[in-house]
Image (tube, helix red, strand yellow):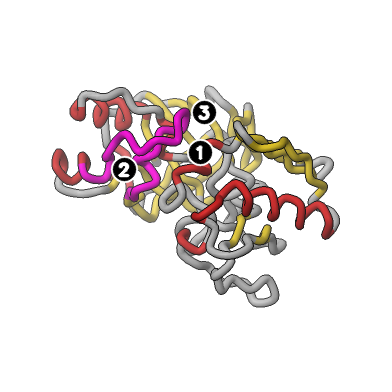
Amino acid sequence: MRVERISRYPVKGLSPEYLEEVELSPGEGLPHDRRFAFAQGDSPFDEADPKWLPKRNFACLMANARVARIHSAYDHGTNTLALRAEGAPSLLADLSDAAGRAAAAEWITAFMGEEARGALRLAEVPGHAFTDIPAKAVSIIGVASVAELGARAGMALDPLRFRANMLFSGAAPFAELDWVEREMLLGRARLRVFKRTRRCAATEVNPETAERDAKPPKWLLDQYGHADMGIYAEVIEAGRVQVGDPLHLV
């Protein structure tokens, strides 16, 4: 088994950033993964007292398919966020100052239109990650799992629908679901699998067209009797992971 793709999502719900390598640290996810989120106007998220909240409190694919139309790019070296979408003016926002953060929030509020529940705000808290589960983790999915579900449904599925951090090859379809409580060596890092990933309506959204043109949660239930696809793993020993590195169960 080997790593085929490494991805992180600096802004929850927006574009991936593909990496050739990444340094993993114990108890953490990928650096800068889900570092930011656009909190909906009615979200109770409080930067002064940050607590994990379900994804519906933020702009997300599960509730807002249109965000798949946004092309975003975050440069952590300059702390700038680029946003563009067809029909909207492009924006390059400096997130180091209040004006830049406000401009990014105003841009996405205008883009969201009727789906904006009041004025959105760009949320960030040092050390906090806007992940889909409370625990910090690395999300992992097998190429074969995505391919088999698509074959059974009669539709090719882009792995990007599942927004995993690590895409790997070399295992049987859905083999990773049986790895819960097992440890793995991923490149030079050591991880422990602790949870299956339960799939939601976010996977219905085509990452290219922003249309809801598939039903992965329903297909999983129909074909396998559950809605699980992919796994979450906790980093227990630091190390570097590169595309092409081996994945070994221990």
Q: Which residue is mark 1?
A: 68
Q: Residues within 10 Å of mark 3 (few under 14, many from 20)?
A: some
How many residues crowd around disc 2 within 10 Å: few (fewer than 14), some, or many (20 or more)? many
149 or 71, nearer to the observer = 71
> What's the mark number on residue 5?
3
Mark sitting on residue 51:
none
Q: Is residue 19 above or below residue 176?
A: above
In the foreground, 29 or 156: 156
Q: In this rendering, would 52 be left or right of 78? A: left
* Residue 14 or residue 131, whichever sits in front: 14
Q: Earlier in the sequence, mark 2 or mark 3?
A: 3
Q: Is residue 234 above or below residue 42?
A: above
Query: Looking at the image, do the residues carrying marks 2 and 1 touch, with CB atoms under 8 Å apart?
Result: no
Amino acid type, mark 1: Ala
Label 2, on which residue?
A: 229
Q: Amino acid at mark 3?
A: Arg
- Residue 6 at x, y = what percent? 55, 33
The CA span between labels 2 and 1 is: 21 Å
At which x and y percent is residue 98? Answer: 83, 60
Identity of the amino acid at label 2?
Met
User: Measuring 36% from the left and 50% from the top, which residue is drawn there?
Assistant: 197
Dot 1: element = helix
Which segment is the magenta one?
A: 199-218
Q: CA distance from mark 3 to mark 1?
A: 20 Å
> Of label 3 and label 1, which has the lower sequence position?
3
Left or right for 59, reference 153 = right
Res 129 seen here: yes
Which of the marked residues, 2 or 1, is nearer the chain's N terminus?
Answer: 1
Residue 236 visible (yes or no): no
